[in-house]
Amino acid sequence: MPFPNDLLEQARHLANREPKRPKQASLRRAVSTAYYALFHLLSTETAKNWKRPAERFTVARMLDHAPMARVCTAKRDELNVQFKTRPRPGHDLNVFKHLHAITNTFVNMLQHRHTADYNGAVKWSRTDVLEKIESVEAAFQSWREIRDEHEAQNFLVTLLLKERKN
Amino acid sequence: MPIVPRGLVDQGKIRVGAQRAERALAPDVIRIMYSFAEDVQGNSSLFFRIVISDAASTPAKLRETTQRIISKVLHEIRAEELGLQTYFNFRNKSEQAMLRDPFWERQ
């Protein structure tokens, strides 16, 4: 996943670009870039399932921010309900927890990216931006843990849906 | 999770819950503020602004600190019963002193 990883590294670079007084432009671009790192991670992973490599970029372009956020919100809320039933500890529960972290981070980062890109009245701090980047780094790690799981691959397919799956 | 309009939310419970969390999380947390607004998906949402201490926001501690704070606040306000989306923003005391942002001060 070189491109998503590069975006994430770039987000951290922007957040730390000015050691003493970070520029709002750097911080806002860092938040936006961290969101796009996660967006491209999920779209790249989805496209990898397309058999013919030549068309994978086109498949990745089918993914759209708002429908993905709706799917992530629905999945996160579904998992919250499931966690309330106190499921038995084990492999399946770990997979669900990682998937919850990924979906929750996507929903949060879409909102923060929207604020960073479009609301100039909001001032960002480096602490806040680093917290956002770390949440995306954790989501990347969660994805590495579950990428080969059925539940994770099923989730990727739902990202292509334009309406909520239920 | 059903999303409810702000007028139907018990704002007193949120205020008391946030105050309880602030007390319990001191001295790492200096103050917890929040506001209601629609999020980018059009859902009624609670946006938290949390000032934390410089000591609690060092690179080595930041993730653990913020995760602990988010978990405690969500627990104290009983977020799942509210039907609201929640979002969190943080800054430390030194950053707020430099930014002098009135939105992050108690009015």
Image (cartoon, coloured by chain):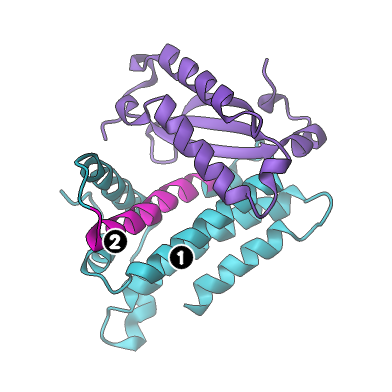
Query: Which residue bears the numbered disc 1?
Result: A140
Q: Residue at x 40, y 71 (%)?
A: A144
Question: In the figure, is residue B27 to the left or right of A74?
Answer: right
In percent of width and height, residue A143 lies at 39, 66
Q: Which residues are magenta?
A: A89-112
- Whether residue B13 appears in magenta in the rendering, the answer is no
Q: Front-most of B66 and B28? A: B28
Query: Which residue bears the numbered disc 2?
Result: A95
Q: How many marks?
A: 2
In percent of width and height, residue A42 lies at 39, 66
Q: Main secondary structure of the magenta part?
A: helix
Chain identity for the colour purple used in the image: B
Identify the residue at the far top of this view. Answer: B12
Question: In the figure, is residue A60 to the left or right of A122?
Answer: left
Q: Residue at x 70, y 49 (%)?
A: B58
Q: Is residue B30 above or below residue A75?
A: above
Indicate the secondary structure of the residue bearing disc 1: helix
* Residue type (three-letter) at the residue carrying disc 2: Val
In percent of width and height, residue B90 lies at 62, 39
Q: Say which chain tag 1 marks.
A: A
Residue B93 in view in this figure: yes
Residue A124 in view in this figure: no
